[in-house]
């Protein structure tokens, strides 16, 4: 892999990840961009104790541009985009409209491919492996920034999820604090250790393997299952069999197998609701240990993949109980969801 670090016209960082080691990326961003003005502010909620990023500068951001004005396509035929080169394999750049910036963290955009019309599920294993390498490298680079406490790599796919750009891409948030969900997991992990003397992540995976009816697929190095108390209609957790705290510590065997397992999961997601249905909207979220949290070595890196579609043409909305009280009501039993995800396996 070849990594090339450069800057855009307004000073934001752009990083190319290329499969061929002899790739040269020296195109210059010729757009007359003003310096980015960000005013994102983290406010703490006194009742809940959680944090809200107030980012008013985001109101002017690009919203559903036509395909020929896509800012994530390479710059070609005189049309200048966020990527100055006329092609790329994987490109990562600092978001021009970040929710978190400066002392408040960092937001990056990851372009999975230069091909506007493909989705992650349509990538080759080599392309998916390069995305994994980029996620891993970004995690390592952001770990070195003092203002970043935790790195979150994720993809939102589908207009129903609120995706405003059709080009296949994901995002990376470097939060300046440990997120509430991660804090909850760390607390559960510590309580489980105190009660049983064992690791919570190991026990969760062991339980799923022994009960078996929520297993979606098993690789040599990865296990995917619908969790016992799934919050979403179709939700899959993917864990490496050898527990590691973050992407940097995956071994070569797990890295090599990941593309095969993850691409299969995404392809199954698109088949859940049968032929003729538009692509399944999903959120794919990497959970990694915060860099400086006590007990981080015990954390279990995993990916959570879920859709908000519950049945053909119907979305699950976060309504009164979920949004008002944080109590999820799931109409699809996790065992039935897992069975469906096994039925739609690639032949
Ligand atoms: Zn595009």
Image: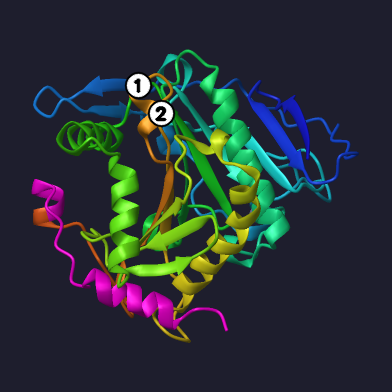
Q: Which residues are magenta?
A: 322-347
Give the residue drawn at x 86%, y 39%: 21
Q: Say above or below: 188 vs 206.
A: above
Give the residue drawn at x 8%, y 47%: 325
Give the residue drawn at x 17%, y 33%: 191
**Which x, y percent locates residue 76?**
81, 49
**Which x, y percent locates residue 243?**
44, 42
**Which x, y percent locates residue 215?**
37, 68
**Where is mark 1, residue-wise?**
293
User: Is 335 a magenta residue?
Assistant: yes
Give the residue drawn at x 51%, y 66%: 266
- Looking at the figure, which quarter contains the C terminus? bottom right
**Where is mark 2, residue-wise?**
297
Residue 51's quadrant in the figure? top left
Residue 149 shows which numbered tag?
none
Q: Circle 2: is it few (<14), some (14-19), or many (20+) Cα within 10 Å?
A: some
């Amino acid at each position: 892999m070849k990594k090339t670090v450069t800057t855009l016209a307004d000073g934001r960082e752009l990083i190319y990840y290329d499969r061929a080691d002899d790739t040269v990326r020296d195109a210059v961003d010729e757009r007359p961009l003003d310096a980015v003005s960000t005013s994102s502010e983290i406010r703490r909620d006194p009742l809940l104790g959680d944090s809200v990023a107030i980012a008013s500068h985001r109101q002017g951001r690009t919203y559903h541009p036509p395909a020929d004005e896509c800012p994530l396509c390479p710059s070609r035929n005189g049309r200048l985009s966020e990527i100055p080169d006329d092609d790329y394999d994987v490109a990562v750049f600092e978001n021009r409209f970040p929710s978190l910036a400066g002392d408040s963290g960092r937001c990056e955009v990851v372009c999975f491919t230069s091909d506007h019309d493909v989705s992650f599920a349509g990538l080759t294993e080599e392309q998916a492996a390069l995305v994994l390498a980029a996620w891993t490298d970004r995690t390592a680079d952001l770990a070195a920034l003092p203002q970043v406490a935790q790195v979150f790599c994720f993809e939102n796919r589908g207009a129903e999820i609120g995706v405003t750009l059709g080009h296949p891409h994901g995002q990376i948030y470097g939060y300046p604090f440990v997120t509430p969900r991660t804090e909850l997991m760390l607390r559960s992990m510590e309580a489980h250790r105190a009660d049983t003397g064992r690791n919570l992540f190991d026990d969760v995976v062991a339980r799923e393997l022994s009960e078996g009816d929520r297993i979606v697929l098993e690789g040599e190095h990865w296990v995917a299952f619908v969790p016992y108390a799934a919050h979403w209609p179709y939700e899959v957790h993917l864990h490496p069999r050898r527990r590691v705290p973050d992407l940097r510590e995956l071994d070569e065997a797990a890295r090599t197998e990941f593309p095969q397992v993850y691409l299969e999961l995404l392809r199954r997601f698109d088949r859940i609701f049968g032929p003729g249905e538009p692509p399944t909207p999903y959120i794919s979220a990497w959970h990694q240990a915060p860099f400086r949290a006590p007990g981080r070595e015990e954390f279990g890196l995993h990916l959570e993949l879920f859709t908000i579609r519950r049945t053909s043409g119907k979305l699950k909305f976060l309504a009164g109980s979920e949004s008002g009280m944080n109590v999820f009501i799931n109409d699809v039993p996790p065992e039935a969801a897992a069975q469906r995800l096994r039925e739609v396996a690639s032949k």
